[in-house]
Image: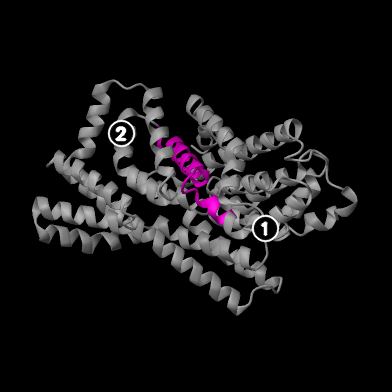
Amino acid sequence: MSVATGFAGIIALFLLLALRVPVALALIAVPVLGIAWLLGWAPAIGLLSSTPFSFVANWTLSAVPMFLLMGFLAFHTGLTGGLFDAAKAVLRRIPGALAISSIFACSGFAAVCGSSLATAAAMGRIAIPEMVKSGYSPSFATGSIAAGGTIGALIPPSILMIVYGVFAETSVIKVFVGGITIGLLTALAYSIVVLLTCWLRPDIAPPRPLDAEKIDRRRAILDIWPVLLLMLVVFGGLFSGVFTATEAGAVGALGAILISLAMRRLTWDIFKTSMIETLMTSSSLFIIGVGASMFTRFLGLTGLTGFISGAVSGAGLGYVELMLIVVVLYLLLGMFMEPFGAMLVTLPVLLPIFKAQGIDLVWFGVLCVKLLEIGMITPPVGLNVFVIRNVASEYATVVQIFKGVIPFLLADLVIVAVMISFPAIVLFLPSLMN
């Protein structure tokens, strides 16, 4: 074992990432070269040849392409198109109804998507033009949708949570259930931000309710029956124990196909587009996962993970100090890396520490995803902000969108503080499944 080689590997990894080397290639190159340095080329090539199959063949990971396919089909066939109108119909009398409706519509879209980028893009196209037309400042309108999109990774089915569960060797379903509470809490906190803005800055967010006469409430609510049916089948079976997370993905994909066929919205072109997007997204996620699995084995071989765990225990760091380090780490990484890569770069080092400290890995999974999603709206590489910029380029610049997300970022930090102070908020629902 060589702890020094492990440290050198981590430094090399971040240097490669700083040089804009793709995350997957950096994660693969470092362990291959590191093991070749320690043991020779034969073990290094053996790791390179065996890890891709051993990682991808994990049964739980087959849920990833299934949930992705469900989300892409629901989006391209328009099954989620009525969510915004339904939210407006229910929340029409509340000040800031359009912004709050868009946030809760993001929550509903997340339940059939699992991706914050897709959630932000879909809702941005629908909600931003209407919000600007109704008197919202472009900065606040775009910022609220960019922030609302982060709920996509908190409400199950979350792709980040599935991969976390595999790496942490913990229950994906329990992480899902813990994420529901924080996803809804996030939506509520964002809604409070909108209400406060309407009260303090009516020039930015007009407080007047929506014109009820222009909303066909019955039709708006009936239009979301496909999404409600899909959610009922998938989550009802998942949380009742009828099928596993993996089986839930397959049921969800099949359900999306059958519902869209029944509504005569599924064409061959839409199906082909959805399949291609599913394959491309899955392959990009899996190759990063393969690299992270190799990096984990490399760090274990060098003895670095055990060394760091022992050092943290010996340093006598308390719970608050350890959590502060983790929060700062993920907030910094979120400024420069996409969430999937940031998570898989850090888990090989952090998981052994938390296991040694006795910290619940279900709770940490939800906290980790929440912190990673904050990175989606922080400068300079807030991916949700750039997605919103692409779909609403005529309304706001990147700087204006980043300005618009500031109050929502503050709300996110409050939620993180609450999660750390009261872990039971996350763990209450998962504990009922024991």
Checking the image for residue 353, the label placed there is 2
Magenta span: predominant SS is helix
Q: Is residue 74 left or right of residue 362?
A: right
Q: Mark 2 packing: few (<14 Cα in 10 Å), some, or many (20+)?
A: many
Given the image, on which type of amino acid does mark 1 rest?
Val
> Eyeballing the image, is 107 above or below 393?
above
Q: Position of residue 267 (x, y in %)?
A: 63, 77
Q: Decide if residue 76 is in sight here.
A: yes
Q: In this rendering, is residue 359 above or below 259?
A: above
- Residue found at the very far right of the displayed protein: 213
Image location of residue 303, percent across then percent down: 17, 40
Label ID, residue 383 = none
Q: What kind of residue is marked 2?
A: Ile
Q: Which segment did they paint magenta?
A: 360-388
Q: Residue at x 47, y 39 (%)?
A: 371
- Residue that carries the numbered disc 1 in the rendered image: 227
Q: Nearer the viewer, residue 261 or 302?
A: 302
Distance between mark 2 and mark 1 Cα atoms: 40 Å
- Compared with residue 99, is residue 31 higher up or lower down, i.e. above or below? below
**Residue drawn 62% across the image and 58% down it:** 393
Quarter assignment of residue 312: top left
Q: Nearer the viewer, mark 2 or mark 1?
A: 2
Give me the residue at 55% from left, 62% from top: 251
For label 1, the crowd category at 10 Å Cα-Cα, with few meaning under 14, some 14 to 19 and many 20 or more, is: many
